[in-house]
Amino acid sequence: MKRAILLSALLLSQFGTSQLLKTSGQKIVNDKGENIQLRGLGLGGWMLQEGYMLKTADFAGPQYKIREKIAELIGEEGMQKFYKAYLKNGVTKQDIDFLAKAGFNSIRLPMHYNLYTLPIEKEPVKGQNTWLEEGFKMTDNLLQWCADNKMYLILDLHAAPGGQGNDVNISDNDKSKPSLWENEDNQKKTVALWKKLAERYKDSPWIGGYDLINEPNINFTGKNPNGTDEMSNAPLWKLQKEITAAIRETDKKHIIFIEGNGWGNNYNGLIPIWDDNMVFSFHKYWNYNDEPTIQHALDLREKHNMPVWLGETGENSNVWFTELIQLLNKHNIGYAFWPMKKIDNIAGITNVKTTPEYEKLLDYWKNGGEKPSKEYAEKALMQIADHYKLNNTEIKRDVIDAMFRQVTDPSTKPFKNHQVPGRVFASDYDLGRMGSAYLDKDFINLWVSDPAKRSEWNSGQQMRNDGVDIYKCNDKVTNQYYVGKTETGEWLQYTVHAKEDKNYTFDIRYSSASTGKIRIETASKEVLASVSLNSTGGNENWKTISTPNIRLQKGENKIKVYFEEGGANLNYFEIK
């Protein structure tokens, strides 16, 4: 009772200075009527795993298959132990504090229903709902961390009972069991879960709203299995209207976010708007950042005089991130990027580092061979769970810089503090927009718009999320990475600080299977040196070439390494 009184007092005190969100025409506003643009991040991979996030996509896409693979090696009890550590480490107050400091003002929580209630097949009494404390407790904690940082928490039902579509990975859908759309009990459980959530959080001012069903993708009457050509969508609108009614029985305040079919973008057959505090959500991946790619959302907003929100986006280059946010800012559209943590991640704000032991498990699962012992597998998996702690991840400063500073600031910043004399690794080029800090000819993935433009942008998939191609390095002196796949006309900029105004010698460490040529120049294009690079006999054969008499000024120097003839790989240059 004492705890309940304290909680009620806390909620009342929050409401006293609350920033509760609501809609006002085509805007999302707070209770002072101020426009709020949601700048958010989705906690993908926490409550719900997708195979690509753990590098298991080739043999285990949906989470239930991942769990089966783990249980095969370490047993059911071991698997439960792993997931307990994984969930504990995946998101903590430290993570939310970090996101707030980075500049995000909201969180989208992708929920798996099975953390809140049992599957219909496991209910002791058919048609009834058993409520599980685990998911609610995780949500309570997350909400408190958000409130502490004055951040909004948007609840997103990412995996609905039975699964909401044919893309099984995103909803942990077991096709051998009836889906959300095939089974009335699954639909009733979905409605009941939302009512339960609304009852619990109706008085929480930092709940940003309820995102009812993530990315429905189902062919009710159309031919495309993911509902992109669906014209009716009648079952989708009917269920979302029923969920809204259940929420409104107890919660009259919070925003309802609805999503269309075809991964959130197909709003065909939309029935008359059934609530006066509702927002359209759309998703955007792998296409151009221009008005035509968001016109369908702008049209919805205008036609219905309702706000729109880009509820999920990401998985692209820094160039794409900056351009997208500039476009959204222009049209006053909020967003939530995806995801926060995954293994071997360059396109997110954190990278979970893999291990040789985990790679061995992946190889066994994919290719067979000698089965790792239970002890070995358990140790490998618990180590990966430990790597999900924020302190053990690699913070991707380049991604954060692209999402925030670079949106409005075209200047460059040093990636590292380079002192002269000293060694400058090629992968430590400046932070900044493409064309300001670097130039690369392959820097964005547009494969939805143009299949010919499907690209890895950074083809080495290492370290940074720009177009610059960075690979693992095996040279005897290394920061683990080298810049490769260089093309004629590309360049990299470095900010270095010289102790004296004098001539220096550049020792350039490179490898190449062919001849190449680089030019060293100032940011104002004053040529300091032109260097021919002979073949070293292969990409893994490293050699050093010295170039003397390069003049640097005392203090800050911005120098460019320009590839007059591409093909060479750069490890570092040492300035003496």
Image (spheres, helix red, strand yellow):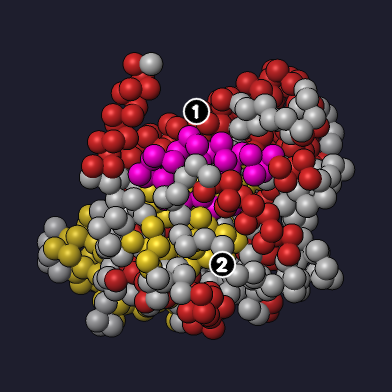
Residue hosting label 1: 137
Whether residue 168 is visible, yes or no, is: no
Residue hosting label 2: 273
Position of the N terminus, as image quadrant, is: top left
Q: CA distance from mark 1 to mark 2?
A: 33 Å
Whether residue 551 is visible, yes or no, is: yes
Sequence-wise, the earlier of marks 1 and 2 is: 1
202 drawn magenta: yes
Quick one: which residue is furthest to the front in this view?
249
User: Taking 72 as reference, is 279 above or below it?
Assistant: below
Query: Residue flagged by tag 2: what amino acid is it?
Result: Ile
Q: Residues within 10 Å of mark 1 (few under 14, many from 20)?
A: few
Looking at the picture, how far across and down is residue 161, in whole percent?
71, 42
Q: Are marks 1 and 2 in contact (CB under 8 Å)?
A: no
Q: Residues within 10 Å of mark 2 (few under 14, many from 20)?
A: few
User: Taking 280 as reference, is 299 above or below it?
Assistant: below
Query: Residue flagged by tag 1: what amino acid is it?
Result: Lys
Looking at the picture, how far across and down is residue 421, in whole percent?
23, 55
Looking at the picture, how far across and down is residue 499, in whole percent?
14, 58
Looking at the picture, how far across and down is residue 72, in whole percent?
79, 27
What residue is drawn where x is 77% and y is 23%? 124
What residue is drawn where x is 63% and y is 56%? 240
Judge from the rendering whether residue 390 lies leftward or rightward of residue 61; answer left or right.
Answer: left
What residue is drawn where x is 37% and y is 66%? 24
* Quarter-of-image position of residue 558: bottom left
